[in-house]
Image (cartoon, rainbow, N blue to C red):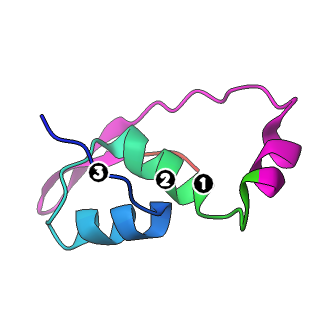
């Protein structure tokens, strides 16, 4: 177990480069967080918003199985 503070975009980039292991719901959450330029913007947008469920599903593809996170 380890910890590190990263900007959401950097965490996703490290994940895509194979430098950081993350589960799909975490990647999805980081991508959402990266859409806000400041903490205040994030709070204003999500303060009263319901917490969405993130339910990945497995999808069969020609090259194997993929985990798909709904938008």
The foreground one among 40 and 35 is 40
Q: Secondary structure at mark 3?
A: loop
Q: Secondary structure at mark 2?
A: helix
Q: Whole-Å distance between the Cαs marked 2 and 3? A: 14 Å
Residue 9 rendering spot, x and y as whole percentages = 46, 68
Magenta span contains residue 64: yes
The answer to the question of whether label 2 and label 3 lie on touching residues, with beta carbons closer than 8 A, is no
Q: Which residue is mark 2?
A: 30
| Total marks placed | 3
On screen, 29 above or below 49? below
The foreground one among 2 and 12 is 2
Relative to residue 67, is residue 43 drawn left or right?
right
Q: Which residue is mark 3?
A: 4
Residue 50 rendering spot, x and y as whole percentages = 77, 26
Q: Which residues are magenta?
A: 40-68
Q: Whole-Å distance between the Cαs marked 1 and 3? A: 17 Å
Earlier-in-chain disc, 1 versus 3: 3
Residue 45 rendering spot, x and y as whole percentages = 85, 47
Looking at the rendered structure, which numbered label has been put on residue 33?
A: 1
| Residue neighbourhood size for the residue with mark 3, other residues' Cα within 10 Å, grouped as few (<14), some (14–19), many (≥20) | few
Q: Secondary structure at mark 1?
A: helix
| Residue neighbourhood size for the residue with mark 2, other residues' Cα within 10 Å, grouped as few (<14), some (14–19), many (≥20) | some
Magenta span contains residue 53: yes
Residue, x 58% and y 27% (percent of image)? 53
Residue, x 81% and y 52% (percent of image)? 40
Q: Whole-Å distance between the Cαs marked 1 and 2? A: 5 Å
The answer to the question of whether label 1 and label 2 lie on touching residues, with beta carbons closer than 8 A, is yes
The foreground one among 61 and 52 is 52
Which quarter of the picture shows residue 69?
top left
């Amino acid at each position: 177990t380890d910890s590190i503070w990263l900007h959401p975009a950097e965490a996703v980039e490290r994940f895509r480069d194979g430098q950081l292991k993350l589960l799909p719901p975490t990647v999805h959450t980081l991508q959402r967080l990266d859409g806000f330029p400041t903490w205040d913007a994030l709070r204003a947008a999500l303060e009263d918003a319901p917490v969405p469920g993130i339910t990945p599903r497995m999808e069969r593809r020609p090259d194997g199985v993929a985990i798909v996170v709904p938008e």
